[in-house]
Image (cartoon, grey):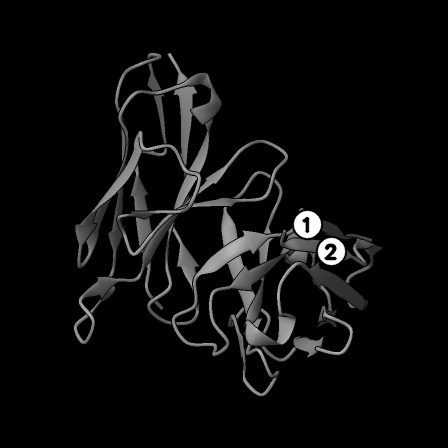
Amino acid sequence: DIVMTQSPDSLAVSLGERATINCKSSQSVLYSSNNKNYLAWYQQKPGQPPKLLIYWASTRESGVPDRFSGSGSGTDFTLTISSLQAADVAVYYCQQYYTTPLTFGGGTKVEIK
Amino acid sequence: EVQLLESGGGLDQPGGSLRLSCAASGFTYSNYAMSWVRQAPGKGLEWVSGISGLGDTTSYADSVKGRFTISRDNSKNTLYLQMNSLRAEDTAIYYCAKTTKQWLVSVLLDYWGQGTLVTVSS
C-alpha cells in the first residue's frame, strides 16, 4: 500500500497569512504515460464530509477559491493557502488515487492564530 | 445537483451485522464507480471499498476483506455495504463517495454523502 505522510499535524496561522501543508507518498504517484500526479487534497470542516479541493496535484475543483493552490510531483506535494480566511479553518487531507487501496494522509488541522 | 444519502447505521454488538445503503441522485449512476470511506471518531479517513459502475469489479481494504461486501443496484441508484462479523474497530462514520469514472482504476472521489454512524459495542 502507498503510505501518505502529512506534516505538520496542525498549524496556527494569522488571518491573511500563508499556510503551507506538506504531503509525502511512500512511492511515486506520477503516472508516466500521461505525466499526471494522482494526488488530491480534501478539506473537512467540523461535522461535515470531506470536500474535494484539488486533484491532479494542482488542478482546483470548480468553485474552489484561487487562494488554494497545489504543487509538487512524484512523491512530494504541497497545499498552500495564500491568504488564510476564517472560513478555511478545517482539517486538510491529501490522498493518492494512483492505485487501490486509496490511501489518505493523517490530516493537518489549520487554525487561526 | 449530485446528492448522496446514506442510511442504515446504528448500534450493534461485536460479531453482529449491519447493511448500509446510499441513495444517489443528480447523475447517471451506472456511469460511475462508487466507494465507501470511513472515519473513526476523532480520526482520519480510511478507504473501505469500491465498486465499478456496472458492479462487475470490487475492491476492499485488507481491514474489511472477507467481512464486508459492497454491491449496487443500478435500477434503484443505490449503493450498499453489507458488514458482517463487526468489530469495535469498525466504529466510524461511513461515507458514500462518487468517483469520476466507471472503472475502478485510479479513481478520484469527487462527491461525498453526509455519512452514517456505525457503533460497535457490547
Label 2 sits on a secondary structure element that is: strand
Report whether A109 appears left or right of A59.
right
State the residue position of label 2.
Answer: B6
Residue at (58%, 59%) from the top-left corner? Answer: B97
Q: As rendered, which of B10 and B31 lies closer to the eye?
A: B31
Q: Amino acid at mark 2?
A: Glu
Image location of residue B71, percent across then percent down: 68, 77
Whether labels 2 and 1 share one chain: yes
Residue at (33%, 68%) from the top-left corner? Answer: A98
Q: Quadrant of residue B83?
A: bottom right
Residue at (53%, 43%) from the top-left corner? Answer: B43
Q: Which mark is residue B103?
A: none
Residue B62: tell me if it is visible.
Answer: yes
Tell me the chain of label 1.
B
Image location of residue B17, percent across then percent down: 80, 68
Q: Amino acid at mark 1?
A: Gly
Q: Is residue B32 above or below residue A108?
A: below
State the residue position of label 1.
Answer: B115
Residue at (56%, 62%) from the top-left corner? Answer: B98
Q: Mark 1 packing: few (<14 Cα in 10 Å), some, or many (20+)?
A: many
Q: As rendered, which of B5 and B38 lies closer to the eye?
A: B5
The mark that comes first in sequence, 2 or 1, is: 2
Q: Is residue B100 above or below residue A87?
A: below
Are dots 2 and 1 in contact, CB under 8 Å?
A: yes
Image location of residue B113, percent across then percent down: 65, 51
- Give the distance between the C-alpha atoms of the residues marked 2 and 1, in whole angstroms: 6 Å
Residue A28: tell me if it is visible.
Answer: no
Q: As rendered, which of B80 and B98 lies closer to the eye?
A: B98
Image location of residue A61, percent across then percent down: 40, 47
